[in-house]
Amino acid sequence: MKRSGFARMYGAVAAAAAALAAPLSGCGEGAPPVVHNESDASTPPEPPEPVTLFPEAPPLPGETECKVVIQTGIPVPSARHLPSCTPVQYATNPPSGGDHWGSWAAYKRYEAEVPRELYVHNLEHGAIVLAYRCPASDCAEVTAMLDEVRTEAASDPRCLMLPGGPEARLVMTPDGALDTPIAAAAWGATYTATCLDKASLSRFVADNYAKGPEDTCGDAAAVDVDRPDGGAPRCDGAMPDAGAPDASPAETPGGDAPGGGTPGGGTPGP
């Protein structure tokens, strides 16, 4: 990946990340402590007003204007691990956090649609999800722009310190449930667009990267929905798992590390 401003931002913490004694490949290792505050949970703060931009670009097919909407500070009251194939309804579109399955998606570009309940787990780890909705016959321009943003977002020292790890916590996937042709998600933040505006999308990625309650990287327990042997849950016509939520050895239900996470759906840490 190219070294952009995003890379320089992370360069300052590379030495500190390399000095971490505990490995970061497991889910939740190195996560900040979670602070539970009953008053905050009952009366979540109002998110700031969304930022709306009108770039000078033509709207994508089916849209009437070029409009970008960026929402940050979205409260996430619950982040429980649920059994695979359990459906979850999310308060924002795209999702900006919430309950999710115990596994997460490997960091890459996907041809098949990654279930939202999978990629929300990536958001919990501080990832950015780049999503799109467009006809297969008229999607080349959209996917090309998202690919540029993904490949130019630069390298993450938390990922690079892991043998065989990904370069950065970025997932690119089609998402047929989107309201707009282009969207991006981070923990507590969303980006939607009806046109191609690479500058604003790249800025969203840089501003919201690694902001999940668990600042961790790794594909060791991740699944790949593009591969038949990729370990992704098979949910077509299947009942949700009856047992405990899927988890890697480092995980515990409701939270990714003993003493961390969000048992009982508590408010995630900063």
Image: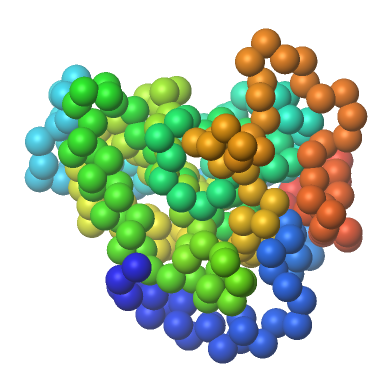
Nearer-the-camera pick, 172 or 77: 172
The quadrant of the image that shows the N terminus is bottom left
Residue 233 picture quarter:
top right
Q: Is residue 153 left or right of residue 87?
A: left
Nearer-the-camera pick, 227 or 138: 227
Tell me: residue 83, above or below residue 70.
above
Q: Residue at x 27, y 40 (%)?
A: 143
Q: Residue at x 34, y 28 (%)?
A: 133
Residue 265 is situated, as x and y percent measured from the top left of the image, at 80, 41
Q: Is residue 180 visible?
A: no
Q: Is residue 169 left or right of residue 25?
A: left
Q: Is residue 79 visible?
A: yes
Q: Is residue 39 left or right of residue 221?
A: right
Q: Is residue 138 left or right of residue 126?
A: left
Residue 150 is situated, as x and y percent measured from the top left of the image, at 35, 55
Residue 85 is situated, as x and y percent measured from the top left of the image, at 70, 25
Q: What is the residue that sits farthest to the front in this orientation?
A: 229
